[in-house]
Amino acid sequence: MAAFPVGDVGLQTVTVPQGRLYVRVRTAAGSAIPLVSNEVTFDAGSVEAPSAPSNLVGTAEGSRLVLNWTNTFDGGPLVGVRLLVSGAAETVLSLGRVSQFRFDGVPPGTYTFRIQPEGPSGLGTPSAAVTLTFPGSCQRPGMPSWFTVGRSDRRLTLRWEPSATGGAATDYEVLLNGVPVVTTGGAREVSGDVGPGTYALAIRAVNGCGLSEATPIQTVTVP
């Protein structure tokens, strides 16, 4: 068992011995609201393929395609994903290490989409499929999931994941006391320094079809 600081980063590379490892990430000891991640199990030195992405949702907004999903880390390391398209057209697109995709001008027809993970050892199992018909009717996004707020001194960090239901989101709004104050450009994490006070925060998803319900409020006090 070991623990070591990594600083204020979202990605860390370390050398570890071979064997099965159980890893968690937590906020620094001085944080007013310590947060601990879920546990990830992996076999160092293995050639296991990355696990299938989850929660793939899609929206056909007329001829515009929007897809959101959650990358998972139960298998080997993830270096990127591929979009598998079948139906009215057949194609495979390498997208990089992303968790959303948008495309304008889809030709009319019915298509099935899957997301397949790529790792150093090869390709993993594709995600569950989403089938959409273009041009499509609007479907507003579902409420974002796994919304958390962390505080370190006067810096707040908000994180969340997309809904597993409803249409795919193109953007997210940060609500303060029920009023939108920040749009994230589609990102699922936002952070910044704030002044003293009590903040009631929530997130809602946006696409061309409307707004989702807001997440349950997370309240944090900054001295």
Image (cartoon, rainbow, N blue to C red):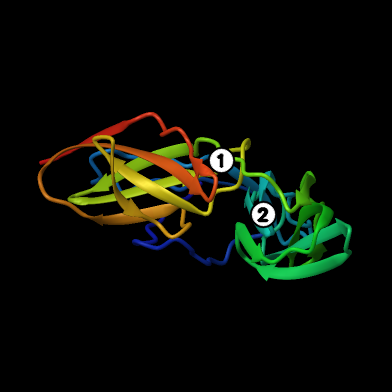
Residue drawn at x 60%, y 45% as measured from the top left: 40
22 or 39: nearer the eye? 39
What's the amino acid at mark 1?
Arg
36 or 157: nearer the eye? 157
Residue drawn at x 40%, y 63% as measured from the top left: 9
| Crowdedness near tag 2: few (<14), some (14–19) or many (≥20) residues, C-alpha within 10 Å | some
Instruction: Say which residue label 2 marks.
Output: 62
User: What secondary structure is found at the residue carrying circle 1?
Assistant: loop
- Earlier-in-chain disc, 2 versus 1: 2
Is any part of residue 70 visible from this angle? no
User: What secondary structure is found at the residue carrying circle 2?
Assistant: loop
Q: Position of residue 187 (x, y in %)?
A: 46, 57
Q: Position of residue 92 (x, y in %)?
A: 82, 67
CB contact under 8 Å: marks 2 and 1: no
Image vertical order of residue 43 relative to residue 161, above or below: below
Q: Position of residue 102 (x, y in %)?
A: 62, 62
Image vertical order of residue 104 relative to residue 54, above or below: below
- Name of the residue lying farthest toward the top: 216
140 relative to 43 in the view: left or right: left
Based on the displayed image, in which of its 4 quarters is residue 217 positioned? top left
The tag on residue 85 is: none
Instruction: Say which residue label 1 marks.
Output: 140
121 or 117: nearer the eye? 117
Q: Quadrant of the C terminus?
A: top left
Q: How many marks?
A: 2
| Crowdedness near tag 1: few (<14), some (14–19) or many (≥20) residues, C-alpha within 10 Å | many
Q: Position of residue 31 (x, y in %)?
A: 25, 45
What's the amino acid at mark 2?
Gly
182 relative to 168 in the view: left or right: left
Residue drawn at x 70%, y 66% as measured from the top left: 105
Q: Nearer the viewer, mark 2 or mark 1?
A: 2
> CA separation, marks 2 and 1?
13 Å
